[in-house]
Image (spheres, rainbow, N blue to C red):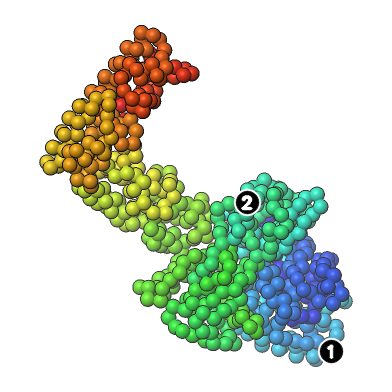
Amino acid sequence: MAHPIIFGTAGHIDHGKTTLTRALTGQDTDRLPEEKSRGISIDLGFAHFVLPSGRRAALIDVPGHERFVRNMVAGVHGIDAVLLVVAADEGVMPQTREHLDILQLLGVHHGLTVVTKADVVDSEWLDLVVETVREELSGTFLETAPLLVVDAISGRGMEALRQALDVLADQVEPKPQEGFPRLPVDRVFTVRGFGTVVTGTLVSGRLRVEDPVEIAPEGILSRVRGLEVHGEKVGEAVAGQRVAVNLAGVERSQLYRGQVVSRPGMMRGERVMVVDLSLLPSAPALAMNAPVHCHVGTAEGVGRLYFYDRNQAKGGERLFCEIRLESPLAVLRGDRFLIRSYSPITTIGGGRVVEVGVRHRRREARLLERLSELAQAKEDDLLFRLLEESPRPLSLQELSVAARVVEERVGGLLQGLPVWSDPDGKWWWAKARWAEWRERLVGTLRTYHAQHPLRMGMPKEQARAEMAPGWPVRAWSLALEAVPDVVQDREWLRWQGFEPAPRPEEVGYLEQLIERSRADGLHPRSASAWLEEVGAPPQIGPDLIDFLAASGRLVRLEEDLYLSREAWEQAVAIVREALRQQQAATTAELRERLGTNRKVAVSLLELMDAQHLTRRIGDRRVWSETREEALPGGAI
C-alpha cells in the first residue's frame, strides 16, 4: 500500500493557489465568511483528492498575504512536498521569495513549481515569466524540479500537473509510523453530538481509537473517541495523514493551534531551545537578547536570542544559540524551527533544534564543539552521549523522547556500547558514570559508618537525598539492587561486612544505660533522663539508645520511652499468666497486674498486640495461642 502523501501550496497573494486547489480537488478551501467576501485566503485550507495512480493525497492551501505568514508556516510544517505557485501575469513577488525562504529553512526538499493564469498573458510574456522564475529558483531545492504551466480555469496543463504530482509522491520518503504519535494541532472546533475535535498532520507514529493521549504543553489528559482521515471514520491513523481527532473530556476553550497531541508522558512544554540557527542574507544584525517570533510546528511564541560566542549576529551567518521563550512550546530535539523579526515582522532565519530545556553558560568548556557533535550525532552516538551527560540513569521512554528514537529500538542501538542497564533493560546509564556513582555510594556509606559506628546503617532516605536527588524512585531502587556490596536492611543501608560496634569510650555509657533501665523495671523514665544521668555527650546519645534497641537489650515502647529486655520479659509473663487465668481482661485490669502507670501499661499492651502476643476483642484482650512468644529485639 502506498504511503500517505501531503502536498502544500506556497506563493504570493492572488496568484491562484486556492483556485488551483479547487481545480485539483473539487473542494473550496476558503471556508471563512471573510475569505469569501474579500476573495483572499486568510487561514489554512484543507482538501483531499485522488492521484491518477489511485493514491489518495491531501493538500493544504496556505494564505499568501504577508499579514498571514504565521498561518502559512503552521500549514507547511508537516507537508511532504510543495507546489510553489507563481502567477503568469505578475511573476515572482515578495511573498514568493519569503515563502521559498521559509520552505528551505523548514527543511522542505521536495516539490515543483506551477506557473498559473497562463491564459491571461501572451506567449512571449509567459516565456519571460518562466525564465524569470527559473532564475529565482537557482540554488534552491526547486532548481531542478519540474516547472509546469497551467490555467486552472480553462484546465490547461492540469492533467500534466496531476501526473507530475503522482511522480513526486513516489519520490517522497514516508514519515516514521513507529514510535510515539505526534499531532501538532492546526484547527480546533466542536461537532454537535460529538464534542471537541482537533485536526493536524500526524508527523510520527500511529493513533488509534481509545488511545490515551496528552495535549502539550499544558499536559491535558484525554482519550481518542474517534478518528477521521479524508472525511472517513477510521480505527487507526498513521504518520503522514491529515487527521481529525475527536477528544474525550476536553473543552473547546482548553485547546488552540500550536498544541501537540501525543502519548502521555512523551512531550512537555519547554522554555529554552538550543538551536543550530541559519540567518538569511537579508536578515538585519541581531543583538544579544533580541526579541523574535519563533515558529515550531503549528506553534508560535516570542523569545529572546542568547548568543554563546558573540554579542551580535549578522545576516548570512550560521551559529549555535539559545531561544529563551516567554511561554512554553511543545518541542523536541531535531524539530525544524523558524524565526521572524519582532517588528517589522519578516522572516530572518531558522534551522534545527539541538537540545531543549537546557541553559548553557558562555564560558562552558567545549560548548560549541559539543553542540556541533550533538547536531551531527547518529542515533546510537546521540543515545550514548545522553547517557554520558545524564546525572542519573534514564528510562527507555526518556531516551526515546530526548533522542527521537523509537522506544523499541533504543536497547538494540545501545548493544555493544559501554553502558549499564537493569536486568529488564528499562533503565540505562553510561558505564563510566555508573561506576563513578557506585564508588561514591560506597565511599559515602563507609564515611557514615566511621562517623556513626553504633547505627545499623545510613537511613535510606538520607542516602537517597545525598546520592540520588531528584531521581525517580524506580531508578534509585534498581541502582541499589545492582550494587552487591551494599546491604539493604529495612530502612537502613550499610556496606557489606559492617556490624555496629561501640568505640572504647562508648562502652561505659552503654553499660550504665543498661543498669539504669534494669533498675527502673516497669517504671521507666525517659531515655533522655538516662542519658543525662550517665553524662553521655549529646552528639552520641541517640546512637547509644538506638544501638541498645537494635541489639535487643532495650525495647522501645514509644518515642523516648524504653524498657530493659528483662522488664519486657517480666511484663509478657505477667500478662500471659493473667489472661490464661481469666481468659480475657481489660486494660485497667492488666495495668493493675503489671503494677505500672497507665501510659506505660497502654504502650506495653499495644506492643504486645503488634507482636501478636495478645489480641483485642472489644475492650478486652485475650492471649494469642497462635503465636510463639517472642521478644521484639531488633525488630522494634
Which mark lies nearer to you, 1 or 2? 2
| Residue 391 found in image quarter | bottom left
Visible residue check, residue 633: no
- The amino acid sitting under disc 1 is Asp
Whether 274 is drawn above or below 239: the answer is below
Secondary element under disc 1, as helix, strand or loop, is loop
Visible residue check, residue 276: yes
| Whole-percent x, y for residue 300 in the image | 63, 70
| Whole-percent x, y for residue 352 in the image | 54, 71
Which residue carries the number 2 mark? 221
> Residue at position x 66%, y 86% from top?
136
Q: Nearer the viewer, residue 522 or 511?
A: 522
Whether 96 is drawn above or below 522: the answer is below
Whether 59 is drawn above or below 224: the answer is below
| Residue 82 found in image quarter | bottom right
Q: Nearer the viewer, residue 247 or 615?
A: 615
Q: Measure how far apart labels 1 and 2 are at the Cα level.
A: 58 Å
Is 559 placed left or right of 10 in the picture? left
For mark 2, does the 10 Å Cα neighbourhood hold few (<14), some (14 to 19), or many (20 or more) residues?
Answer: some
Is 275 placed left or right of 595 in the picture? right
- The amino acid sitting under disc 2 is Leu
Which residue carries the number 1 mark? 122
